[in-house]
Amino acid sequence: MKIGIIGSGGMSKALAGKWSAKHQVMLSGRDLEKAAGVAAAVVAEAGTAAEATAFGDVVVLATRSEDVFDGIANAGGAQAFAGKVVIDINNPISLETFRTTRDDGRSLTEAIAEAVPGAHIGKAFNMAQVAVWEDPDMTYDGRQMVTLYTADEAADGIISELIADVGAAPLRLGDNAHAYQLEAAAAMVIKFLFAGRDPHTIFNFIQPEAKPIR
């Protein structure tokens, strides 16, 4: 699979570092020199947002949440995403109130879906800090980390596969009407992180029917 990532920050590096073992990955960023350095560290390619979007069967939106729509524009606009799976990993959260900043009761993911109507959309990887995604083990109290995600039907299987490829257990919450719930849940985690909790702090979904890792 080819994965294009719009962004070259910590999350981009952590996810690309896992995916590059099985997939072709291209990172992008406004600072091309920085993007190239990050890409070299995780055995990926580097390019512009437009190049990464054209490259990927899957495009990961890994900018700051407030820059998402600029990132889409820089990539070539809605037409550049037609037919692609697009994964939103962002959290529109105020660091003053630790609440979601969207006041219309809808998620950033749904707004992205409206902005790129020809794409297949999902939300994932938003409920944990960079250190978690860098972790090679992905187990907490003897249990595999469960990653909740939302997706439309066309994106579901691919997003589930990419979650498994980083070492977590995928669990679909539902379609993207539920993405707002993931953003609100992430706001709680972020509040605790800013209060000084360990960077590996997560909500882990306990599934009693699942066998513990031995």
Image (tube, rainbow, N blue to C red):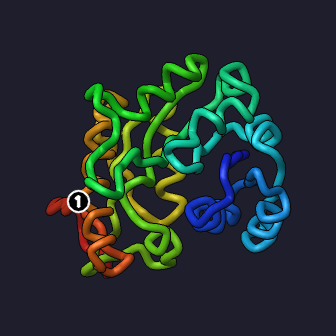
Residue type at tag 1: Phe
Residue at figure coordinates x 33%, y 50% from the top left: 148
**How far across and how far down the image is residue 153, in percent?**
44, 27
Q: Is residue 146 left or right of residue 110?
A: left
Does residue 77 lie above or below 181 as drawn?
above
Does residue 129 lie above or below 117 as drawn?
below
Does residue 188 lie above or below 181 as drawn?
below
Q: Farthest front residue?
A: 96
**How far across and how far down the image is residue 80, in percent?**
73, 25
Pick whichever, 95 or 54, lies toward us: 95
**How far across and how far down the image is residue 51, in percent?**
82, 40
Report the number of discs.
Answer: 1
Q: Is residue 181 left or right of residue 169?
A: left
Q: Which residue is mark 1?
A: 205
Label 1: how many Cα within 10 Å (few below 14, some 14–19, many 20+): some
Q: Is residue 169 left or right of residue 42?
A: left
Within the image, what quadrant is residue 74 found in?
A: top right
Within the image, what quadrant is residue 22 found in?
A: bottom right
Residue at figure coordinates x 60%, y 45% from the top left: 60
Residue at figure coordinates x 74%, y 34% from the top left: 75
Pick whichever, 82 or 153, lies toward us: 82
Pick whichever, 38 or 1, lies toward us: 38
Q: Is residue 131 left or right of residue 46?
A: left
Q: Farthest left residue?
A: 208
Q: Quadrant of the C terminus?
A: bottom left
